[in-house]
Structure formats: C-alpha cells, structure tokens
Image: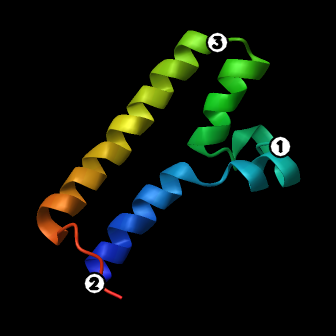
Amino acid sequence: TTFFIAIMSIIGGFQAGFDPAYIMTGGGPNGSTTPIIYYIYNNAFNWHNMGYAAAVAWVLFMIVFVFTLFQWRFLGKTIHY
C-alpha cells in the first residue's frame, strides 16, 4: 500500500499547486515556486502562448496517464475500505 500512496502522491503533485502559487507568491521570486499548472496558466492567459500551453498540458496529461496506467496494471483497480 505504500507504493500505491507514492504513485497517488506523484499524480497529485503534478495536478495540484495552482492556488497557493497564484494567491500567495504569484510564482515566487524568479519562478522558483511555479508548479506546472501555473506555468500552463501563465503561458495561455498572461503571455498569450495558447499553443505552447496546450502542448505542455498534453505532456502533463500523458505523464499522469502513464502513472495511472502503471497503477492500474500493477496495483489493481479495486478499492479497499
């Protein structure tokens, strides 16, 4: 189960982090606290690079999808309560 938690934490780490970065730091000094979601947002809406932002979002999707497939394949799809 520890391995399952690690995989879920990796997936959650890629998807989370927009709110604190946007509200508290705005990406931090020189982009030091910029998560990938905030980077996509900046490229799309602040810097008007919608195509690049879409490409980065697809790469993020593929990374999360690969981790999800790995989890389904080796850890199963069942939920234990």
Residue shown at 42% from the left, 27% from the top = 58
Measure the C-alpha gap from mark 2 to mark 1: 36 Å
In the image as oriented, which residue stretches furthest toward the right?
A: 24
Element class at badge 1:
loop
Q: Residues within 10 Å of mark 2 (few under 14, many from 20)?
A: few
Q: Earlier in the sequence, mark 2 or mark 1?
A: 2
The residue sitting at the bottom extreme is 81
Circle 2 or circle 3, nearest the eye: 2
Hey, what amino acid is under mark 3? Answer: Asn
Q: Which of marks 3 and 2 precedes in the sequence?
A: 2
Mark 3 and mark 1 residues within 8 Å of each other at the beta carbon: no
Q: Is residue 47 above or below residue 66?
A: above
| Quadrant of the image occupied by residue 49 | top right
Quarter of the image for the C terminus: give it. Answer: bottom left
Say if mark 2 contacts mark 3, CB within 8 Å: no
Q: Secondary structure at mark 3?
A: loop
Disc 2, disc 1: CB below 8 Å? no
Residue under the image location 13 percent in, 60 percent down: 73
The residue depicted at 43 percent of the width and 37 percent of the height is 60
Residue position for label 2: 1
Residue visible at 57% across and 40% down in the picture: 36
Amino acid tagged 2: Thr
- The picture places residue 12, in percent across and down from the top left corner, at 49, 59
The front one of 76 and 23 is 76
Question: Label 3: few (<14), some or many (≥20) within 10 Å?
Answer: some
- Residue 26 bears which disc, if any? 1
What residue does disc 3 label? 49
C-alpha gap between disc 3 and disc 1: 18 Å
Relative to residue 35, is residue 63 drawn left or right? Answer: left
